[in-house]
Image: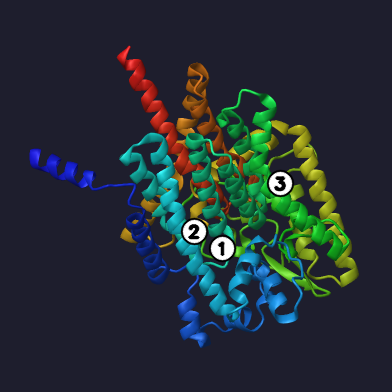
């Protein structure tokens, strides 16, 4: 036993958070290995076997802007091809501007591979800096190692490195922003706030929901700024907001001059119709949260049906795609009921105006819309939009506690527990299934739950002990919760990648709050 303790003690002594190059190299090895052996988006296979992926070859080599993923890339593609930065898509152009730096010198597919490599490099640096931020506050090697493993070696988050999405890069910018805020906590160097605000602002320029992160972050900064004068404190905090203000003001002016209207955040084109947005809200906020917990991935569930219940496919009318219901749906949850429609709609809130039968009528209208001519089709979707609007309003009026509190909490529980099955399919039972479930619990559910457990005592103790650093840490941790509920509020409640930009706050918050709570308890026990 003594020898084992000596071995462990010696091994632990080798952990040196200051050796940044060692930790970054370890993380790079992990990320490149994961990208090669377990790719979410297999660039090499597409490159070496184009005949196996004719659709992707067409999208990403011949005509990039024909695919929804290329919403992130399309403005840059058109600038290189046609000399015009546009058309403006459903996305803010923060990711496209970075992609443009590669696309100016490389063909589309190789520029996308370069972006994946950039994701991996910045991800490795961000993972180390986030762990270092915890170490700067706690001086604990244990908490440094915990943060590095939980964030830097998360197999689910790092798999997004190889996708042409903004999720990964946006989250890494958030991580580095947190590191700079932590450094400001210690050094009180005001220029750090500008750099931190710039990175967080650019992350929001890629993922607009990240603007929510500025609210708790700004409040936390007011606690961290060591200025006795209130005016000076506010002026210092505004340094954090200057970059995002300049970025967004410049973009909105450019967009208005170019398009003659103000920019509006949009869904993908098939989901941006009024009735489709309401379907998204009814499914994601009202019905899906009441479905049963399950880790099994429904075999027929695809991207187009993640938000479904009323609809399960798309139809095209006059060159525009619309969600519709032409055949029996393959729900994104399991149901052993004989009538899956009734089983699903019975989960939705029932009001005096709408019950299960009323909601099934809406589904029937969506089915009917497929069979009629264009004129009748547009009349039917107007009627559907009207009925969905009435249903939402009836729930708000009759079940406002459910609408504004209970159902969002239920959606949040689903999101932090069983939603990972939609990104990492858990279908086959056996040893592999067990390993995947354990990894999902360890890296997806556990950090969220631990942070929630630590959050309440941290807020209470910080107020009791007047510990501004602990209170600021707790407020920064709530950034993740605020971000999650911003997605849930519009019905986007079953895609775990929406948690990604909040994950740095969770991992950092666990480390910092654990340190402050341990210090407080240790101090009290000595009295």
Residue located 82% across and 57% down the image = 253
Tell me the distance, in whole angstroms, between the alpha carbons under discs 2 and 1.
8 Å
Which comes sooner in the sequence, label 3 or label 2? 2
Whether residue 264 appears in this view of the structure is no
Q: Considering the numbered disc 2 on the image, is that residue within a helix, a strand or a loop? A: loop
Asked if 293 appears above or below 457 in the picture, the reply is below
356 and 285: which one is in front?
A: 285
Residue that label 1 marks: 301
Asked if 69 appears above or below 179 in the picture, the reply is below
Q: Residue furthest bottom?
A: 51
Residue located 31% across and 59% down the image = 431
Which comes sooner in the sequence, label 3 or label 1? 1
Eye-nearest disc, 3 or 1: 1
Eye-nearest disc, 3 or 2: 2
Tell me the distance, in whole angstroms, between the alpha carbons under discs 3 and 2.
25 Å
10 Å crowding of disc 2: few (<14), some (14-19), many (20+): many
Q: Considering the numbered disc 1 on the image, is that residue within a helix, a strand or a loop? A: loop
Whether residue 228 appears in this view of the structure is yes
Q: Quadrant of the C terminus?
A: top left
Q: Which mark is residue 441?
A: none
Residue located 23% across and 48% down the image = 14
Q: Which mark is residue 297?
A: 2
Contact (Cβ within 8 Å) of mark 3 with mark 2: no
Residue that label 3 marks: 356
* Image location (x, y in percent) of residue 403: 69, 37
Contact (Cβ within 8 Å) of mark 2 with mark 1: yes
């Amino acid at each position: 036993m003594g020898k084992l303790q000596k071995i462990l003690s010696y091994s632990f002594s080798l952990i040196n958070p200051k050796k940044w190059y060692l930790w970054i190299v370890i993380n790079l090895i992990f990320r490149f290995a994961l990208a090669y052996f377990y790719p979410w988006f297999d660039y090499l296979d597409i490159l070496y076997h184009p005949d196996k992926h004719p659709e992707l070859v067409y999208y990403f080599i011949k005509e990039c802007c024909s695919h929804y993923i290329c919403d992130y890339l399309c403005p840059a593609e058109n600038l290189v091809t046609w000399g015009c930065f546009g058309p403006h898509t459903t996305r803010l152009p923060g990711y496209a501007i970075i992609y443009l730096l590669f696309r100016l010198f490389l063909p589309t597919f190789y520029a996308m591979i370069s972006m994946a490599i950039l994701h991996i490099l910045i991800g490795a640096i961000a993972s180390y800096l986030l762990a270092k931020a915890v170490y700067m506050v706690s001086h604990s090697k244990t908490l440094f190692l915990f943060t590095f493993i939980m964030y830097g070696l998360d197999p689910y988050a790092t798999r997004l490195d190889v996708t042409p999405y903004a999720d990964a890069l946006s989250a890494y910018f958030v991580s580095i922003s947190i590191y700079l805020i932590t450094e400001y906590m210690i050094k009180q160097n005001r220029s750090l706030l500008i750099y931190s605000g710039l990175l967080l602002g650019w992350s929001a320029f890629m993922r607009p929901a990240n603007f929510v992160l500025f609210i708790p972050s700004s409040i936390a900064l007011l606690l961290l700024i060591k200025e006795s004068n209130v005016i000076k404190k506010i002026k210092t905090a505004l340094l954090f907001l200057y970059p995002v203000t300049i970025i967004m003001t410049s973009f909105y002016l450019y967009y208005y001059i170019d398009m003659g209207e103000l920019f509006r955040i949009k869904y993908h084109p098939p989901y941006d119709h009024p009735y489709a947005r309401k379907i998204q809200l009814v499914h994601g906020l009202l019905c899906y949260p009441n479905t049963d917990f399950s880790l099994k991935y429904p075999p027929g569930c695809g991207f187009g049906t993640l938000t479904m219940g009323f609809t399960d496919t798309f139809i095209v009318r006059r060159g525009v795609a619309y969600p519709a219901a032409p055949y029996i749906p393959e729900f994104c949850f399991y149901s052993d009921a004989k009538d899956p429609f009734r089983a699903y709609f019975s989960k939705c809130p029932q009001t005096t105006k709408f019950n299960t039968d009323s909601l099934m009528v809406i589904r029937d209208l969506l089915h009917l819309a497929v069979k009629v001519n264009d004129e009748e089709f547009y009349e039917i979707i107007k009627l559907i939009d009207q009925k969905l609007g009435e249903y939402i309003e009836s729930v708000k009026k009759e079940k406002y506690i459910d609408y504004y509190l209970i159902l969002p909490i239920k959606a949040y529980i689903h999101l932090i527990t069983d939603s990972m099955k939609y990104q990492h399919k858990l279908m086959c039972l056996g040893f592999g299934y067990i390993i995947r479930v354990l990894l999902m619990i360890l890296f997806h559910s556990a950090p969220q739950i631990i942070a929630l457990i630590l959050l309440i005592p941290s807020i209470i103790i910080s107020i009791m002990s007047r510990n501004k650093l602990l209170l600021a840490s707790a407020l920064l941790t709530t950034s993740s919760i605020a971000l999650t509920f911003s997605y849930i509020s519009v019905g986007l409640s079953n895609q775990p990648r929406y948690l990604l930009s909040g994950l740095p706050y969770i991992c950092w918050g666990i480390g910092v709050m654990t340190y402050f709570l341990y210090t407080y308890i240790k101090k009290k026990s000595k009295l």
